[in-house]
Image (cartoon, rainbow, N blue to C red):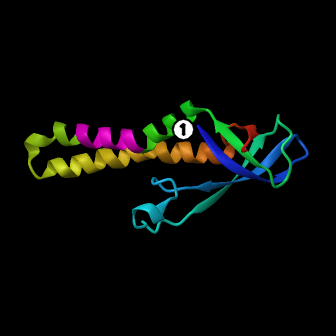
Amino acid sequence: MRTKATVEDLLPDGRAALLVARESACSGECHKCGGCGAAEQTLRVTAQNPVGARRGDIVWLETRSAAVLRGAATLYLLPLALFLAGYLAAYSLGAWAAAVGASGFALGLIPAFVRDRRLKKRPPDHVITGFVK
């Protein structure tokens, strides 16, 4: 996954602290479609700096796509799959099927919380791959 970032500071270990502007699904061009009003968020991340970027440079930041996709699957697909499995398994119970499905959904969120805690302790590797021209 590749995104633009601004170098905020250089760290002593050869890494850089970066500011990444998170954009909405419409790529931040809300004025073109009437505006969704989504607030822009800025994330602070650290990354390897093999290209020698300096403070204030706008750079390309890359993260392994597999890590991003694994996180998305854990957060979105697993709870949905467990909801559907619980609902369909308990369909013959009538009104209780929704409660069993909701329980499956809640159970599906547990791995997402565990993954979030792990990411806080050990963030994914980011690498600066070049300068934005």
Against 73, residue 20 (above or below) is below
User: Mark 1 highlights which residue?
Assistant: 68
Q: Left of 76 or right of it: where is 47?
A: right
With 131 as the anchor, is 78 left or right in this view? left
Chain part drawn in magenta:
76-85
Which image quadrant for residue 76?
Answer: top left
Quarter holding the C terminus is: top right
Q: Is residue 16 left or right of residue 114?
A: right
- Queried whether the magenta region covers residue 79, the answer comes back as yes
Q: Position of residue 112 (x, y in %)?
A: 48, 45
Q: Position of residue 2 (x, y in %)?
A: 61, 39
Q: Position of residue 68 (x, y in %)?
A: 54, 38
Circle 1: element type = helix
Please check the rendered image and state whether residue 34 is part of the magenta-colored stretch, yes or no. Answer: no
Quadrant for residue 61, please give it: top right
Percent across and percent down for residue 126 are 70, 39
Could you tell me which residue is drawn at 50 percent across and 53 percent down? Answer: 27
The residue located at (44%, 45%) in the rendering is 110
x 43%, y 37%: residue: 73
Q: Main secondary structure of the magenta part?
A: helix
Q: Amino acid at mark 1?
A: Val
Please state which of residues 127 and 52 is positioned toward the viewer in this rendering.
Answer: 52
Q: Locate the N terminus and report the quarter of the image it occupies.
A: top right
Residues packed near mark 1 inside 10 Å, few (<14), some (14 to 19) or many (20 plus): few
Viewer-nearest residue: 123 or 103: 123
Q: Nearer the viewer, residue 82 or 35?
A: 35
- In this rendering, the count of numbered labels is 1
